[in-house]
Image: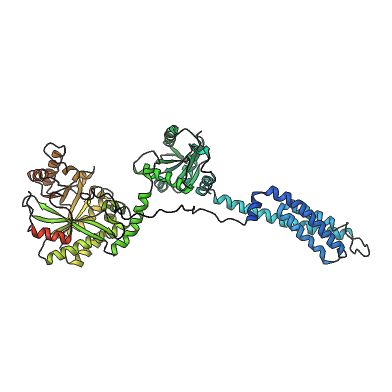
């Protein structure tokens, strides 16, 4: 939870490595039609060329059948409907009607009613039959044309965005998959994903229609660029993808910069000019061995990096690959199991009162011993967990375990407070204060023995709600401290309003603390300021005797760090505490 002891643990045990996965087929693969139908869709001209003589042959065969069975007065004349329907099915309504008319002539004046007597048909008789033949061919052809138009519309919908009429993600995947990996034309082609980062903000202010309007205008701007190889693809509601025409590698950065300048121009919505925050991620398609999904994912990785670092665009490189991100997502999935299977433990790092050298409390630091991966350092999973809903469960587990440990120490005659880190999401949860108070009640622990550490950035998101929640906790005598003090930029304005009684000077100022270091005056000023505000000070990251003694001279209240002791599991801490009789004497 604290970073003071996690920066040294940077790797997962080498005994666990995920097995290499075989290449996966794209999830967007569509079901294939039967081979004959697929051939017919791909080769309509050849199909019609083969069907025309076949229909004529079948028509002649029906004429021969009817004539040799005695004439049209017998039922065999109805066989001609199959030929007519076939003509309408293959050629459509006009040719279907023409086939019907031709069939009417074949079985009309050219065919007697009774072959044995040679009796000819009346004109009205065969004209009436010919009318039905024409209607049958027209009906079948019309039905066929309607079905084909509907199927064509469905096919269009599969590959286009309805609102903007731009090709969609599936169209992009299809195009990239259809491009051979060895195609030299792709040697310096690039795929870029462009995202409107503040689309949600615009939709909230102006309604859902603004997204389509901005995307349309953005698409027009992209199509006016001379380096575009294809029209843009709308891959989701706020993102477009484009493929650059083959260009020299050294020119791609210039192209991306020009695009960024184009994006900076305002967009029009109704009578308003609005600003869109647009970022881009780009990946090269040269000699690619990856499938289309992988190429698109690489561009999206670069886009995410651009957003995280407030850059206008980023080109993909292997260092940005998501192998680590995939591993992190797997860890998050396994973390929920770890919460219920005793894989997580708390280690305790003592905090020493510099005035009396007495150990008055500890900080609880989380450790994860995975059954397969081995030891997983906190820096590997806690930062990502803080951005997920799992942080609520993780924090609840940490507080519950810490309070249980306090109860055990009280039974042993040890009276120590435990500090637990909480995150921004915890403070924004509507029932956080209630859950903490319920845990105090569960373990029958006094609130003075629990300390909650919050970072400066945590209370900046919603200062009013944060103050309200922290005040409820402070009313229960829970100690509140501001962690990593000095690394933020706005907390001084609100410091007096917060019900915190302790600040923790960040380890980055303390590690190198000496009389000649630049942090000397910073730490001294932080200590003096906190005391003037009636607050106590904890210096974390104490690693040298010189820093320990300087902090004592500054009047700092508490010190914590490797110079005093490393974080220890509960049993090891008990032995350390008892052997030192609750006091620390620096060598």
Q: Quadrant of residue 452?
A: bottom left
Q: Is residue 256 left or right of residue 409?
A: right
Q: Nearer the viewer, residue 451 or 190?
A: 190
Q: Residue at x 63, y 53 (%)?
A: 38
Left or right of 38, for residue 277:
left
Q: Position of residue 244 (x, y in %)?
A: 49, 37
Give coordinates of residue 182: x percent, y percent.
52, 41
Most foreground residue, 376 or 219: 376
Q: Is residue 431 left or right of residue 87?
A: left
- Report how many numbered discs are placed on residues in the image: 0
Specify the farthest residue to the front: 15
Residue 58: horizontal and vertical position, in percent?
Answer: 79, 57
Q: Nearer the viewer, residue 356 or 452?
A: 356
Q: Is residue 498 shown to the viewer in this render?
A: no
Percent coordinates x, y for residue 555 in the rendering: 8, 46
Display colour scheme: rainbow
Residue located farthest toward the right when viewing the structure as drawn: 117
- Whether residue 108 is visible to the viewer of this picture, yes or no, is yes
């Amino acid at each position: 939870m604290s970073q003071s002891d996690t920066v040294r643990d940077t790797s997962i045990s080498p005994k666990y490595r995920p097995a290499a996965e075989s290449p996966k087929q794209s999830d967007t693969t569509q079901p294939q039609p039967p081979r004959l139908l697929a051939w017919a869709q791909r080769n309509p001209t050849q199909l019609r060329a083969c069907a025309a003589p076949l229909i004529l042959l079948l028509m002649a065969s029906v004429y021969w059948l009817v004539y040799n069975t005695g004439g049209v007065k017998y039922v065999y004349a109805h066989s001609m409907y199959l030929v007519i329907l076939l003509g309408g099915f293959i050629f459509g309504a006009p040719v279907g009607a023409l086939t019907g008319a031709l069939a009417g002539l074949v079985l009309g004046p050219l065919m007697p009613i009774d072959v044995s007597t040679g009796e000819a048909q009346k004109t009205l008789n065969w004209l009436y039959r010919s009318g039905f033949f024409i209607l049958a061919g027209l009906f079948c052809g019309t039905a066929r044309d309607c079905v084909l138009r509907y199927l064509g519309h469905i096919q269009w919908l599969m590959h286009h965005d309805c609102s903007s009429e731009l090709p969609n993600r599936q169209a992009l995947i299809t195009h990239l998959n259809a491009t051979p990996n060895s195609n030299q034309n792709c040697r310096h082609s690039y795929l870029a994903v462009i995202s409107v980062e503040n689309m949600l903000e615009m939709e909230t202010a102006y309604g859902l229609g603004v997204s389509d309007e901005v995307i349309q205008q953005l698409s027009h701007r992209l199509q006016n660029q001379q380096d575009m190889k294809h029209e843009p693809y709308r891959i989701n509601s706020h993102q477009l993808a484009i493929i650059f025409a083959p260009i020299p590698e050294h020119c791609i950065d210039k192209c991306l910069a020009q695009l960024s300048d184009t994006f900076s121009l305002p967009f029009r919505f109704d009578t308003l000019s609005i600003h869109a925050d647009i970022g881009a991620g780009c990946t090269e398609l040269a000699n690619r061995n990856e499938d289309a999904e992988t190429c698109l994912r690489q561009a999206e990785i670069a886009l995410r990096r651009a957003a995280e670092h407030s850059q206008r665009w980023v080109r993909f490189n292997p260092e940005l690959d998501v192998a680590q991100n995939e591993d992190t997502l797997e860890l998050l999935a396994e973390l929920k199991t770890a919460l219920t299977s005793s894989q997580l433990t708390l280690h305790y790092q003592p905090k020493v009162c510099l005035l009396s050298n007495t150990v008055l409390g500890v900080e609880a630091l989380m450790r994860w011993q995975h059954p397969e991966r081995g030891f997983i350092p906190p820096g590997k999973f806690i930062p990502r967990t803080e951005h997920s809903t799992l942080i609520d469960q993780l924090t609840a587990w940490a507080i519950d375990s810490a309070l249980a440990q306090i109860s055990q120490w009280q039974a042993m005659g040890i009276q120590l407070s435990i500090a637990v880190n909480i995150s921004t999401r915890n403070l924004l949860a509507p029932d956080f204060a209630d859950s903490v108070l319920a845990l105090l009640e569960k373990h029958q622990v006094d609130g003075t023995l629990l300390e909650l550490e919050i970072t400066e950035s945590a209370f900046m998101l919603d200062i009013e709600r944060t103050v309200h929640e922290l005040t409820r906790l402070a009313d229960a005598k829970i100690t509140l401290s501001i962690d990593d003090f000095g690394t933020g930029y706005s907390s001084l304005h609100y410091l007096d309003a917060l019900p915190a009684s302790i600040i923790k000077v960040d380890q980055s100022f303390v590690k190198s603390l000496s009389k000649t270091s630049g942090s000397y005056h910073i730490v001294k000023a932080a200590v003096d300021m906190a005391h003037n505000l009636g607050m106590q000070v904890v210096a974390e990251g104490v690693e040298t005797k010189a820093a320990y003694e300087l902090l004592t001279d500054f009047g700092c209240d508490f010190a914590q760090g490797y110079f005093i002791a490393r974080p220890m599991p509960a049993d090891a801490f008990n032995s350390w505490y008892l052997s030192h009789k609750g006091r620390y004497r620096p060598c």
